Amino acid sequence: MPTPTDYLKKGALRVIEPAISFLARNNVSPNTITTVGTLLTVAAGVVYATGHIMTAGWIMAVTAFFDVVDGEVARRTGRSTVFGAFYDSTLDRVADGALMAGLTVFYATNPVHHSIYMMVVCLVGIIGTFLVSYTRARAESLGIDAKVGVMQRPERIVLLSAPQALFGLFWNGWVLIAIIILLTVTAWITAVQRIVFVHRNTKHADNKPIRIINDPTSPSPTTNPSKTTGMPAPRRAQS
């Protein structure tokens, strides 16, 4: 079932269609678009750290353009690659970390809005955000599409841009506080939902024991990796 974010993305694609067509015609590299978008997001994180919350919100609104365009340009120019997907996902993690780190620095250094409690919330939010992406990536490596949960990346980007661009530190910063708490709580809820989803989908799978590389009961005709490399071989083939 389409989510509100899906409808929002379709509307945004109609608006930025001329820009997408221009970039595709000029054969602009999707990886370049991804890199520029990430650099702008990191810049937004720095602006968050300096306390210019409304400005950072507007910068984030611009980065949403790059977040949508890179994939569209890749598809239209036939340049969708495995490395491109890996690169995009990796830089997404850099962007997520930069934003929450910027907010952490803001609450650590701002003389008016300094708050140990909000620093802790931001740090917990960073962990939760990374767990959301990791649980999906790890599930996909097991052949499971775990794109489930109440808060995925498009929703996070919207919440980190629109309210800040419109309200900044309105109500003495309580709007920003509410957004950060919402992001942190929903990130952890989403991570748990994905863990439960994978558990349900693997519960009835064949319960084959994990192969031990150095298992003496399963000799291999190949040379023992620990002797070849001079390093102790890992205990498990899959961590």
Image: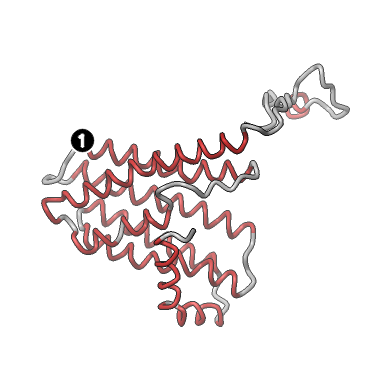
Q: Camera-side residue: 206 or 187?
A: 206
Residue under the image location 54 percent in, 75 percent down: 28
Q: Residue farthest to the top?
A: 216
Residue density around tag 1, few if under 14, some if 14–19, many if 20 or more, within 10 Å: few
Residue under the image location 48 percent in, 46 percent down: 133
Q: Amino acid at mark 1?
A: Ile
Q: Is residue 215 above or below residue 222?
A: above
Q: Is residue 91 above or below residue 235?
A: below
In the image, residue 164 lies at what x, y percent?
24, 59
Provide the residue designation for mark 1: 116
How many numbered markers are drawn?
A: 1
Query: In the figure, is residue 97 to the left or right of 81?
Result: left
In the image, residue 45 lies at what x, y percent?
32, 54
State which quadrant residue 165 falls in: bottom left
Residue under the image location 46 percent in, 82 percent down: 18
In the image, residue 82 lies at what x, y percent?
64, 57
Residue under the image location 20 percent in, 58 percent down: 52
Q: Residue farthest to the front?
A: 1
Instruction: Report the coloring of the rendering.
Output: secondary structure
State which quadrant residue 36 falls in: bottom left
Tell me the quadrant of the picture where the C terminus can be found.
top right
Q: Camera-side residue: 188 or 99?
A: 188
In the image, residue 173 lies at what x, y percent?
15, 50
Provide the secondary structure element on which disc 1 rests: helix
Query: In the figure, is residue 198 to the left or right of 210?
Result: left
Q: Is residue 130 above or below residue 208?
A: below
Query: In the figure, is residue 148 to the left or right of 225?
Result: left
Query: In the figure, is residue 164 to the left or right of 1?
Result: left
